[in-house]
Image: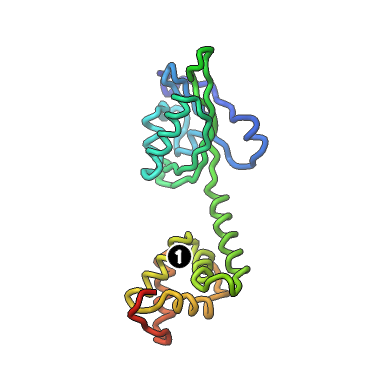
Amino acid sequence: MTSADEPAERPAAPPVLASHTSLPLAAYAYSVTEDRWEWDEAMYALHGLARGQVVPTTELLLAHKHPDDRESAHVVFLDAITHGTPFACRHRIIDTRGRTHAVIAFGYADADESGTTVAVRGCIAEVTEPLVAETRAAADYAVGRATSSRSTIDQAKGMLMSSYGLRADEAFEVLKAVASPRNLRIRDLAAALVDHESRRPTRPGGCAAAIADLVILVGAGTLPRDEQAP
């Protein structure tokens, strides 16, 4: 095991990927035979660390995975070691400041003459900002292309996604959270939202702000109550 101060050879990002993406890349290499990791500067930075602060280990790497992604990411890595399977694994990393980074880890195995994996090399591409842009673009498309064939609920979900930065599932849960305790049909609430809020600007605040604004919307009492399921 190397010391924290010992300079390690800096692994290069796979040239094919590096030449075909503008995403920030952090490179790594893992020696299976020596149980030793090599990280480049970007890999340390992605985890909120600097070279010399820590010795990179498998345990450290897993500790920074999002709890919901940790097991699946580890299984993919073990499969690369055991079977030499190349991979592209989408997951989340939590750095030392508590910030969450959406990433895709790419890797491939190096084998000896007997076919045994001796190293795994690759890089991690951060996709946090591209994912945000993709979500916004999808929401804007949903609003802009809304037609009679697109359900009113889907239109309302698209507006909530665009205005509050929500995911599709979060947008639907917001509609349910406001409609259910007030005996409103979700589609009636959605129709009111589409009718009154189709051109409102983007707002911060997420689910809490969306629920608060919808409660204000239904406060006038103009929406029909219904005891049946939405």
* Residue found farthest to the top: 113
Q: Residue drawn 47% across and 59% down?
A: 167
Quarter of the view holding residue 223? bottom left
List x then y, in percent, for residue 158.
53, 66
Residue 168 image offset from top left, x and y in percent:
48, 61
The kind of secondary structure element at disc 1 is helix
Taking the spot 51% from the left edge, 37% from the top edge, the residue there is 105
Give the residue type at disc 1.
Ala
Above/below status of 30 relative to 100: above
- Asked if residue 42 shows in the view, the reply is no
| Position above or below: 148 against 80 | below
Q: Is residue 143 above or below residue 124?
A: below
For residue 26, which quarter of the picture? top right
Relative to residue 76, is residue 59 drawn left or right? left
Q: Is residue 12 left or right of residue 189?
A: right
How many C-alpha atoms fall within 10 Å of the one at disc 1: few (<14), some, or many (≥20)?
many
Residue drawn 44% across the image and 16% down it: 33
Residue under label 1, please give it: 171
Q: Residue at x 40, y 42 (%)?
A: 69
